[in-house]
Image: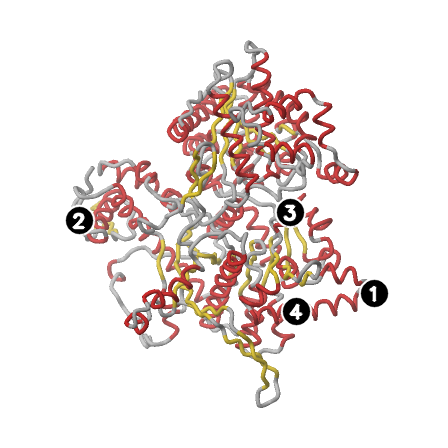
Amino acid sequence: MALSSAGKGPEHKDKATTMQVEDDRTGTSVETLRRAMADHLFYSLGRTAEMASKQDLYMAIALTVRDRLLHRWLNTAETYFHQDVRVVCYLSAEFLMGPQLANNLVSLGLYNQFEDALKQSGLDLKEVIEQEEEPGLGNGGLGRLAACYLDSLATLDIPAVGYGIRYEFGIFDQEIHDGWQVEITDKWLRLGNPWEIDRPEIAVAVGFGGSTQSTSDERGKYQVVWTPEHVINGVPCDTVVPGYKTNTANTLRLWKAEARESFNFQKFNAGDYYGAVIDKVYSENVSKVLYPNDDFERGKQLRLAQQYFFVACSLKDMLRLHLAADGKIQNFHEKVTFQLNDTHPSVAIAELMRILIDEYEMEWERAWFITSRTFAYTNHTLLPEALERWSVELFGGTLPRHLEIIYEINRRFLDEIRLKYPGDEDLVRRLSLIDDAGGKYVRMAHLACVGSYAINGVAALHTELLKKDVLRDFYYIYPEKFSNKTNGITPRRFMAVSNHELTELITSKIGDKWLSSLDQLKQLEKFVDDKNFVSEWQAVKRLQKERMAEYVLEKTGVSVDPAFLFDVQAKRLHEYKRQHLNVLHIIHLYNKLKKNPHLSITPRTFLFAGKAAPAYITAKLIIKLINSVAAVVNNDHDVASKIKVAFVPDFNVKLGQILYPAADLSEQISTAGKEASGTGNMKFALNGALTIGTLDGANIEMREEVGAENFFLFGLTADQVATMKSEGYRPYDYYESNQDLREVIDLIADGTFSWGDKLIFRPLIDSLLNYDPYMLLADFESYVKCQEEVSQLFSRPDDWARMSILNVARMGKFSSDRSIREYCSDIWHVDPVRVQIEKYQQSNAMLKMPKGKDLRSAAAQTCF
């Protein structure tokens, strides 16, 4: 395991009269890559090959890849700066990017070259890739969607910046102790992060708290001065986001909070050691952890501070770049558009108004004209409780000036509503940005709707339900703002990186263009009756299941058979996603087998993965139930040869890359009308899993695309759910009338899965029998019957493979490239910008400063 000795210099290859010269920072030949890796190991990390650990080798390889990214990144930034471009700024509290090394190699088209270079150096690229720590900067679908969209923006050559928070500690690592979830600190930065570049020279000052004072200038113009109590610095940390096989490399700019003065020398000398660093502690808390617990007031205050912190930094940063490029403040909205990824960044609307009015002394009407044409809003939820609200008291204490601005926005907005709809005070009350019912709250979704020029849902059903229910009144007054943009996923991450064998098989039949034009998968349909192709397809799935079985054994101690049907539900733990409905089905099968141990059924392995929010007691109890059922089933000789259950801990992108390719069946069983879209459904289907699901979220469109005959449908529709609830849903009636269901519930209640403890799962049982807000009991019978259809089909492997191939072939619509094209044409009105990169020439490789450049000028800091 040795890299070639450190050294640097051009590589010469004589071919007749042609000489090829490669730079160690940009060259792509195997020889150049080996030399570059050795150079970084020696000079960047201070290690020889004999001294190097796995982490050292990973860092040396990552830095070698980063060099090639920077070459594209700086050319991209320069192109944007010198051309008259419109820039998309994607504001998101989460960016679940996943491990970077393999994805960057695929995007650069250098995976095979690095694999060869490492093999010749005595290393295995896959082992090095496994060494990488995943940055847990997102909770689930929201953050992963943001990451997919950044990938597509770069791949489509769209000028864009992702803005968010560089959390020191991300989403917790999950361990399972005695069946319970235990949260462990995610120390993703403990060994360093080779992909980010800090930019402290362009740090942004952000204020909190304090007071406001109204004055009039010498001309009698009304002004407000905000004097914050605390001011902290936002330091940008940049990560390069390359497009797939394009020269474009965009920026993900995450902000970390730092104290303006991290150490008070006078207080320290006076013996006040805590006081000497109190500003540092206060400031750094803002970007310390993803989603602090907001069950108490200080947690809520920290969440609001986080949201304001990153949007304030991002707006000031983009204003700096816009003005440096000879833009005018009056045309900011023409050159920049900000997409609000859910309500978390919606305080940006009040912040831009504050900047324009207080700092640029703009008249309200002009400031509102610019602001209301700068932002677009994506709604990601149908759950009313997920629409953010902040108490006026908390909001005003944290952001006093912004509360004043929101009140003024609301006053003017409601005046317009009263003029347009005279006498309809109920409408005024429902639309108000301030909720007066039971205390005063700022409604952030209302602020986003009023202050944005476009509002979109993320699946056809979701958008229709927004119009009919969640945002009904805003659709009534602003129908022109609404549109649907069904979510998508990037096939680069979720096929090329995670399912190399299936990618190669598909490419061998239809070429490699499908990775950037997913509609080309349609060509696979002509191979569904090709026996050799079907056999190869089945062999790839078997290989992935064998890998997953090894992983499950390592992480859980449960031995699973790859020949079993792999039935997988991997997603955030939430009652509306109904992991416990899946568990009811497992107990139903267990009960049948206990009654008749010789019963012939299709053998299944049930795999669960997902994290519950630390304060979500019911979700954590469902995890306990899954593990308790697993403990009984897996150790019961009557059933263990026919069903196995495993909860695989710490679900993240890295685990998903193993899990999605291995799944036979994808569980998408949320209560109809509750899931906005879902993207896990797309990841499973793209990797050849068949879907069992309700008519919810993007399931509806997936079923339309793949064909109803290739989708396992069960359950109530959203309309039926609404009707049953309005008529008075009685879950206990289902318990009494369905013997199978009654026996399942009774097995839980009598302590069968809790070693005789009849109390531990009592809260779940009481909820199901008396309330059942997510209609599990109503859907149970339909679900069980649908699962019987699944079992029958799996017993016919060739028919199953045919449906699997057709599912993949018809997934073209669900590329994030398609989603981004729709955003670009319908909402953002941005065009691609091609980036050109000159070939390496030694004569141009010397440091040469532009004539007349003033290093003291702000222009020195205009580019990213």
Secondary structure under badge 2?
A: loop
Marks 3/4: CA distance?
A: 26 Å
Q: Please give left or right for residue 862 compared with residue 669 in the image.
A: left
What residue type is disc 2 on? Ala
Instruction: Using the image as rendered, state which of residue 87 and residue 634 is in the foreground.
Output: 634
* Foreground residue among 520 and 330: 330
Single out the mark in the foreground, 3 or 4: 3
* Element type where label 4 sits in the image: helix
* Residue beneath disc 2: 6
Task: Point out the frontmost of discs 2 and 4.
Answer: 4
- State the quadrant of the C terminus: bottom left
| Residue drawn where x is 43% and y is 58% of the image | 287
Residue 184: % across, % down: 41, 43
Q: Nearer the viewer, mark 1 or mark 2?
A: 1
The image quadrant that residue 56 belongs to is top left
**Chain-order first, disc 1 or disc 4:** 4
Mark 3 and mark 1: Cα distance apart in space: 30 Å
Q: Amino acid at mark 1?
A: Gly
Q: CA distance from mark 1 to mark 2?
A: 80 Å
Residue 158 versus residue 3 in the image, above or below: below
Residue beneath the point at 16% across and 41% down:
50
- Where 528 sits versus 475, above or below? above
Q: Is residue 618 visible?
A: yes
**Residue to which mark 3 is pinned:** 383
In front: 842, or 26? 26
